[in-house]
Structures are given as structure tokens and as C-alpha cells.
Image (cartoon, rainbow, N blue to C red):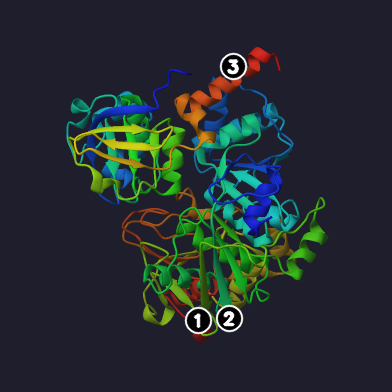
Amino acid sequence: MSALTAVEKVLAAKSGRNSVKPGDVVSPDPDYIMIHDGVVMAAKRELDALGITRLAAPDKVMMVTDHDVIYGSARAAERGAFNRKAAAQWGVKNFFDVGRGGHGHIFPMESGLLLPGMFYFDNDRHATNAGAIGAFGFRMGTEISRVLATGTNWVMVPKTVRLTLKGRLQSGVHARDVGFHFAAMLKQEKLSADLDYRVLEYAGDLEQFDLASRAALCSTPTEIRAYGVFVPPSPAIIEHAKERGQRPFTPVYSDADAAYDADLTLDISRLEPQVSLPGSVENAVDVSKVEGTVIDHAFIGSCGSGMWEDLVTAASILKGRRLAPNVRLFVAPGSETTNRRLASEGLLGIFIEAGAVMLPPGCGPCNDAVIGPVHSGEVSMSTATNNNAGRFGAKDAQLYLGSPATVAASAVAGKITDARKLN
Amino acid sequence: MSEFQWVLKGRCYKLGHDVWHAGGVVPSWIITGRHFDPKDIIPHLFEETDPGFHTRCKPGDIIVTGKNFGMGPKMNGYIAMQALGLGLVCESMPFLAYRAAIGCGVRVMTDCVNATDLCDTGDEIEVNFRDGFFINHTRDIRREYPPIPDALMEIVELGGNAGWLQQWQAKRATAGS
């Protein structure tokens, strides 16, 4: 049997085959089927119209509430009521309603639902976060209805691109900075690879990255068209999964002689904190290039930067400080567990004392500005997944991206700031 | 099912590289306005590059494009192409654009290397999407390209995902499961 990459092994195993190769079309049997609160209504109505009222595998369905958690409108409340009824009618086993669970791309990894070696279907493209725990989540978009009805869907086995990270990040530099820098290197053609429908698999000096940092590593490649991201689970990740795991699991790793579509190397030992300039994650520059840019709006959270360690980083900067008078800062923890821990370990007080507004666990402004948006002409500094024009509010707002440390420091200073230089 | 037309013969309509779905295939407002009814989309297909396209095209006509066709993967334009009976041959597409085209039941072949060098708008083209043949009768050129994978043919035959799911449910109801 030829050597396989991790995604090829997982897709082969879930499809009952010994082996698969890129381009093969398979129908994998997933461990979960995830659907978020924003699209349940459309899927339910589509299936109801076809007379499909029973799901193939309600025990596998994970319905999460993270896109519009606190109902800023009557319409949102109506959608919430619809979702609740749908979950009951479908007999969904894992229904995470408002205030339960949190961000669907974070809490299942934290809580031991999603484990190394697993595969799941998701309506949302940020399912790539599964790579942080050594699993795969594939985006189905509106085709999630077919998965709900039949239990599977067709998947063309993607090619894999390997990115080897060399060296240790300097103190004050974050895994999100790595992603921004990588995107910029591709755009500037200093690295060459096509990520369209590829799995980006990390290799190299990965022991330094905890689960939160691994989620951060998964974020930016998704914005530049990677279909999956995979960070081979370290002993620490396996230990986490064993401690929390709600069922047995088998971690998967690529064979040493597996074939990659491209093989890239990035030295991260001298990387500086990065800021992605408005318009694209690919517009990353060293923070020093934009220091001093006055900001109005700040946000810490999203599937790329909403885990416990991200918020610890932000709190360490906000401790004993107040936000600049010109800045409003929104913080959306990734999970209810993290929220409770913020309270029990005293970090919630730090955010509130600093003047931040705590949002419920979920996507925060990063979902279509249902909460905490920017106004025309405003400048935002955030850890959102991307900064495409209009991502969270007015199209002519200027959206900068950085790590939780850079965003926290900038919110305190009132302007884009290198956290390492904050007085 | 056996009568499904995998071979289309008609006029070539050639486009260049890097055509965005929004603007290049249909106007952005069709996408943001969530228009999914072919009747609403057809009058606006390729409107910004070739106004009145829908009045001139005929079932069987083939759209031949350069690289990266349909960037910003959306379904709207493919819904119109399927309803008009058009075929699509691309030098390359972002994968999710290809998936959207298949999901809308469009006869589509991608990774057709240098296809735009083999034809011009107005040429008489014949394409066999099942077996992967591309023939330009005007220029007497014939090429083989990757056809629609076997595993995806049923979706296209049934007019896309909606038709596929409808048939799946009908079969299940008949089986009494």
C-alpha cells in the first residue's frame, strides 16, 4: 500500500477503504454532523418540502448556537424558536442552545467531543479548526441538508500541502502572527503553493503550540482557500484528548514518505508580531509598520482566537489598565467553560475593570455584524477570522487584524501598538 | 435517465481568466439578493460582459473559460446555466465553484488545459461530458479532457442536489423504509 497523508488515512478509514488518493470521490461516514444556528431554518425547510422529516443519524448531529446568540432582533428570536423546535422534531442528540456549549469550532475540542483522528461534516468553512486537535471537519455549505438526510455526502479527496515551521516564536509573538505572515509570504510569492481545496498540514517545531495556538494556526489558511488544516497532535494534545475524551479515539499521522502537493518551510524564530492591513489577511506587515494608527473598535474572540489561553494573554495586558477613551472593546470567549473559568479565576474582573464589553460565547461581531459592528469610516483592530471589506459592519470601515496581545495593547493605547512596548 | 444528453453541440462563448462569479457571471445584486429562481437570474447571466446574452444563447451552447472561473463560489449563475441547457468547459475553477456547478446540475469539465486556445466565440463546439471529448468543428480540433467523475454523474443527470435528494426520498418512500 502506498504511503498516505493524514487526511487520506482518515477519509479511507471513514469510507471503508484501505487507501484513497487525491481526486478519488468517497462518501465518508462521519463521526459528527454539525450545523449552526444561522442555517438550521433553511435546511429544515428544504428537507420538510421534500417530505424528509427523519434524519439519517440524529445521534451524530451537533446543533450549535454561536452565530446569533443573544437575539438582537425579533427575527433572531423567531429563528431561535424555530431551531429549538427543529432539534426536538429531528431528535438531535447534541443540541447546544443559547448559553450551552459556545462556539461550535471551539468547545467540542475543549470538552472532548471532537477527538484526534475524527472526521465530521459541517455547514461552515471554519470547520478547519478541527485540525487543532488532529481531526478533520469538511465544509458542506447548503449541501449539509443532504448530509442530514442521508448521513453522508460526496467528498473528493484533497491534496495535501506541508508547511514545516522552523524555530521557536519569540516571547510576545503569537500563533495568529504565524498565519498572517504565511499568507503574506504566499501573496508576495516568497513561498509558492496553491491552497485551493488543499489540506494544509503543519510540521516541524510544533511542540510549542498548545490547543489554542493550534486553533490559531488553523485560522488564516482557511481564509486563503485551504479546505482543511491539520496539526499533528503532540503528546500534550493526546493527553488533553484522553483526559476529556468522551469515547475512544485513534490519532492519525501522515506516513513519513507520503506525497505532498507542495512542501514549504517557514522560519518563525525571528517573526515579529503581525498586523493584517484592511482588505485581506494576506496584507500582513510587522506591527512596527502601522504603530500609531488610531482605532475606534476592538474585538477579541472568533474561532481563531477565542480559547482560554488567548484570553489569558489578553487579560495579562489589560490587568490594571483601562481602555483608551476612544476605544470600545468587545470580548467573546469561545466557550461556556472558558467563560466560567474567567469568572472563577478572576480574569472576568480584569476585562470588566478595563472597560471591555463581554459578549456571550460565540462568533461575536465576526458573524455578519449581528453584534458589536463598526460604523462607516471607523477603524477596528481585532482577532476576527478575516478583514475583508464589510466583514463586521460598514464596507468602508478599516479592519486591521492582529493577535490577542496586539489587540489588547492597541485597545489600551487607543492606537495600534506592539504589546511588548506597552508602558 | 438513459436519455440524458451528455453530449452538447452548439456555439462557443469564450471568456478569459479570473472571472468572478459576482460581476463576471451575474451581477452582485443577484447574489446578495438571494435570487435562486432561474427565471429571475437568466436575464442577467453575463449581463455585465455581454448584455443580452440570454437572448442569443441556445440550449447546447458551450461556455469555454480560462483559469479560475467562478471565483467567490456561489450557485446563482450555475442555476441559470443549467436552466438554459448550457455546458461549461474551464481551464480551471476553484474547487468549491466546481462543486457548486455540479450541485446545480451543470454539465461541466474543469482542468481542461489551454481550452481557450482551441476556440473562439462563435465556433461550432461539441463536448462529451461523460467521456471527456472536446471537438471544435469550425477548426477541426479534437482534445481529450477529464470528464465528469462517475460518482458525480447521477447528481448532474438529476438536475443537481435538489433533484438528487428528491429522487433519494422518492426511492426511500417507495421502498417503504
Circle 2: element type: loop
Residue type marked 1: Leu
The percent position of residue A252, horizontal first and vertical second, equals 71, 59
Residue type marked 2: Leu
Circle 3: element type: helix
Point 61% across, 17% down: residue: B171
Up/down of A292 relative to B8, above or below: below
Tell me whether circle 2 and circle 1 mark residues in contact (CB < 8 Å): yes
Any mark on residue B115, and which? none
Within 10 Å of disc 3 (Cα), the crowding (few <14, some 14-19, many 20+) is some
Quadrant housing the N terminus of chain A: bottom right
Q: Which residue is mark 1?
A: A271
Q: CA distance from mark 2 to mark 1?
A: 7 Å
Within 10 Å of disc 1 (Cα), the crowding (few <14, some 14-19, many 20+) is some
Is A162 positioned to the left or the right of A291 in the image? right
Q: Which residue is mark 3?
A: B170
Camera-side residue: A220 or A300? A220
Camera-side residue: A66 or B39? B39
Up/down of A325 relative to B137, above or below: below
Q: The disc numbered 2 marks a residue on which chain?
A: A
Q: Same subunit under labels 2 and 1? A: yes
Q: Which residue is mark 2?
A: A169
